Amino acid sequence: MPLAQTVTAVPVVVDDAKCIADKGCTVCVDVCPLDVLRIAETLDGRKTAYMAYDECWYCMPCEADCPTGAVKVNLPYLLK
Amino acid sequence: MDEIRDGMNRIDCDILVIGGGTAGPMAALKAKARNPGANVVLLEKANVKRSGAISMGMDGLNNAVIPGHATPEQYVKEITIANDGIVDQAPVYRYAQNCYDIIQELDRFGIRFQKDKNGEYDVKKVHHIGTYVLPMPNGETVKKALYRQLRKARINISNRYMATRLLTGEGRIAGAICVNTRSAEFLVIRAKAVILCLGAAGRLGLPASGYLYGTYENATNSGDGYALAYHAGAGLANLECYQINPLIKDYNGPACAYVAGPFGAYTANAKGERFIECDYWSGQMMQEFYDELVSGNGPVYLKLNHLAPETIGEIEDILHKVERPTRGTFQAGRGTDYRQKMIEMHISEIGFCSGHSASGVFVDEDARTTVTGLYAAGDMASVPHNYMLGAFTNGAVAGEHAGDWIRDVDHAAIDEGAIEAERRRVLAPTLREDGIPPNQIEYKTRRMVNDYLQPPKVTSKMELAQERFAEIREDLSSGMLVRNSHELLRSLEASSILDCADMAAAASLFRTESRWGLYHNRVEFEGRDNENWFCHTLLTRGRDGMPTLRKQPVAPYVVEIDDTEKDAYYRQRVGSNALKTVAAE
Amino acid sequence: MNGIFDDFADFDDLEENLADPDPGARRVAVMELADSADPAAIPLLARAIGDPDAGVRLQAALALGEYDGPETSAALAGALSDSDAEVAQAAAASLTELKEAEAAAPLLSYLSDATPFVRASALRGIRELRRPEALVPATAALEDASAEVRAEAVGVIGWLKDEAGLAALIGATHDPSAEVRLLAVGALGFSQSLDACAALIAALGDPDWRVREVAAETLPKTASPEATSSLIDVLSDDAWQVRLKAVRSLGKLRARAAVQHIGRMMAHPLSNLRKECAAALGEIGDSAGLAYLGAHRDDQDPDVRKNVRWAIGRLSA
């Protein structure tokens, strides 16, 4: 069967002004139990973390362990 | 990102611990402490820093057997009665004897338990016979403290590797085949002993929200341990005794009535009245919860609004900081202030988890499974009502025993053909041009679990489930599509979930009586049938590759329970369902 | 085996990164030092906690929570006066992680710091180390102008469980702050002395219900012969929480003299209280309790019914 692209709103938000991924920080990506976060390049060539897969247990290590307070975990819309 | 690379590494170790959540780190530490010369590897699908059921810590112990508050004998009695007598007491007794040492050791690790104003453990009373609740108001540091100990002991930690199958040879354990979840490269680990600590099967039923990851258990706990043990030929006990929990509705996380209980909070119906008869968090209690939910008195709530604001503040401090901190966000979003409103509760989807019920990979008092050299501990091993402290304690038991056992054995020979076959199985979905993605395979499996396996259990529905599972199995093996290494991880989890679904159906069909309250409420077989079913059920993989079951006797009790004690307990159950159960005996 | 196992820190690289002009890079280096679990990280972190960038200092304060010993406590205590409140808070939190007795010494000199927060945090760090030499300075701190400091001082003395600190604790049961009184009353539980009992009995008349509640809860830990009559007196306390603890304590003490009083309270509208009364009557084990229990066999609350059945079973046995 062919595949389709379906949009989904994701709960984890990263403030790229605060994120220090381009300094080599990967804390949130490292600690996520479900491995849903990745590092991407922003338009101005910097790096930032973002939620790549909509598979979140809203458990919070990414937010709690982020050294700069850049990560915010919201509840997935389906259950909030 | 997450491209699929071709690669295969091989390493040898003495003891391989799979799963770095709760039991696993303790098993690795104890194995190394017992046998400092041993090469111990701790393998984890996520990252040991924040993996497993207690990723964000835990707000209390509810089965702490602390001298002066409870005795091991009392504890064994209560667990035996709470599980309708189907308990091998030796592992429970071992746990009860060892757990206080483990509490003190965790304390030295820097894990915080509530202490009184003189620095003594502040154990809270909840039961008549024993007192088992020890709150952990600063329990958010558990994983951090464990990680620190692992690093100090210089344990080899391997993160982001998922074990896909165990290797056996010469009739015993030989190692494991693993795949990296970010590169799809393989890792074959030969080991003299393997300790399975992979947690619950918490992604079995589908949460009412429909969100695949909105589970009660940490959603990484997809039953991989049950599937690994099953394919390696180990026996699994009483899988029909599901895990079902009372939870905050929609949020699907624990309301932690046991934390709030000692402060005076309780579970109430819509009228604000208490309704639970049962003394212990068990299938019987869940039956009472279920009955109230579907009665005119529902829904069910956790009631705190009669407490003083100071007390509620204290409870919030615990509940909103530890274990599931987003509870606070959720309640704020719903406008639920504990001071005014009761908290709406619901029951969870089904799962397997000995931590809360009684099913799991069968183990003896040394945490040994039925496969030589293979151990299991924590939520996936069959020691009932184990909770977090049980995972730590039995992980320690497994680690120490394995530390000794490997001294006299060498690596078992492994079958290269098995490695190649497994590699082909794992990579097959990556070789297709199109097909069904893992999330759809998983969603359908789990929806069928809800439709047909969720209690009350009905024979014809469970048989239909088996038909649907067979169809999905065919889709999974010949039509699943995986485009990157992350999806590969999900495809392997989907396979574990389907194995668990088949095991749940087969075990439930086998036991033709009702037992453990809601957990195994079989509508056509009302009440307990002690004459035919006072036994464990043991599930293994049959020659056709599907589950096969047999009865296994309950081991003679270590702590005797006389009939008057049993009677006293059953008399306490005055609900209609309980009366039926007593009458059937 | 590179790539298969987690790396252990390379200190040469980290030291270089700690001198990087970019604060973000320094911060990442500090995080790696936290993970190394190698005491060689402590001097590097002690330096980083003085970094010009507040973010780096915060990270170092958190990282030092992974370590122990006097060098760690000295570095953390210094950071309690950080100009950035977040750094100071993190240092205070890390101080509570200390376990090694030798870590106490550097903290003692901060007990005379000008800032109450510093004094309180140093005391909190000392508390769990249970150092006898902390008794005198902690007792002196009970005279501190700040209630926060006095509360932590009570904590230190309570954890020492030393009769030599008893007079100080008893004095603190009259503190103007209810918070301090509450802690002091709870801390008296270790002592079997008559003075401690008398102070606990006096605290049953404290103006704050939470203090009375703790007093009622703590009293059975002591061996006072007057405990029973005093607890019976507070069965008529205005706050149900106090009554509940008094009932529970009378049950623990197996106070036969309390049976009628507790029995009469079985008619209270609060089910939590009825439940506790039934349990206490069972624990006391006097058959006179049966008369009160019988009427509640069919109590509307299942928990009360359970406790009543249990108690009747015990009294009839």
Image (tube, coloured by chain):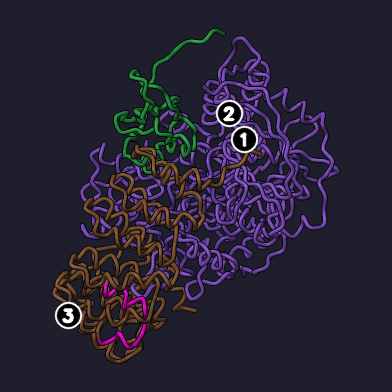
- Magenta stretch contains residue C160: yes
Whether pointer 1 and pointer 2 mark residues with C-beta atoms closer than 8 Å, the reply is yes
The amino acid marked with disc number 1 is Met
**What is the magenta range?**
C153-167
Magenta stretch encompasses residue C93? no
Could you tell me the amino acid type at mark 2?
Leu
Secondary structure mostly seen in the magenta stretch: helix
How crowded pointer 2 is (Cα within 10 Å; few <14, some 14-19, many 20+) is rated as many
Task: Please give the name of the residue rendered at 54% of the width and 39% of the height, measured from the top-left corner.
Answer: B221
Q: Residues within 10 Å of mark 3 (few under 14, many from 20)?
A: some
Secondary element at tag 1? strand
Chain coloured brown in this rendering? C
How many numbered marks have been drawn onto this rendered protein structure? Answer: 3
Asked if B476 appears above or below B335 in the picture, the reply is: above
Q: Is residue B376 left or right of residue B517?
A: right
Horizontally, is C201 left or right of B513 in the view? left
Chain coloured green in the rendered structure: A
Tag nearer the camera, 3 or 1: 1
Element assignment for label 3: loop
In the image, residue B478 lies at what x, y percent?
67, 16
- The answer to whether residue C306 of the structure is visible from this angle is no
Identify the disc placed on residue C174: 3
Task: Return the residue nearer the eye: B217 or B298.
Answer: B217
Residue type of the residue flagged with mark 3 = His
Residue bearing mark 2:
B489
Q: Earlier in the sequence, mark 1 or mark 2?
A: 1
Q: Which residue is mark 1?
A: B162
Tell me if residue B221 comes above or below residue B269 in the rendering: above
Chain that the image shows in purple: B
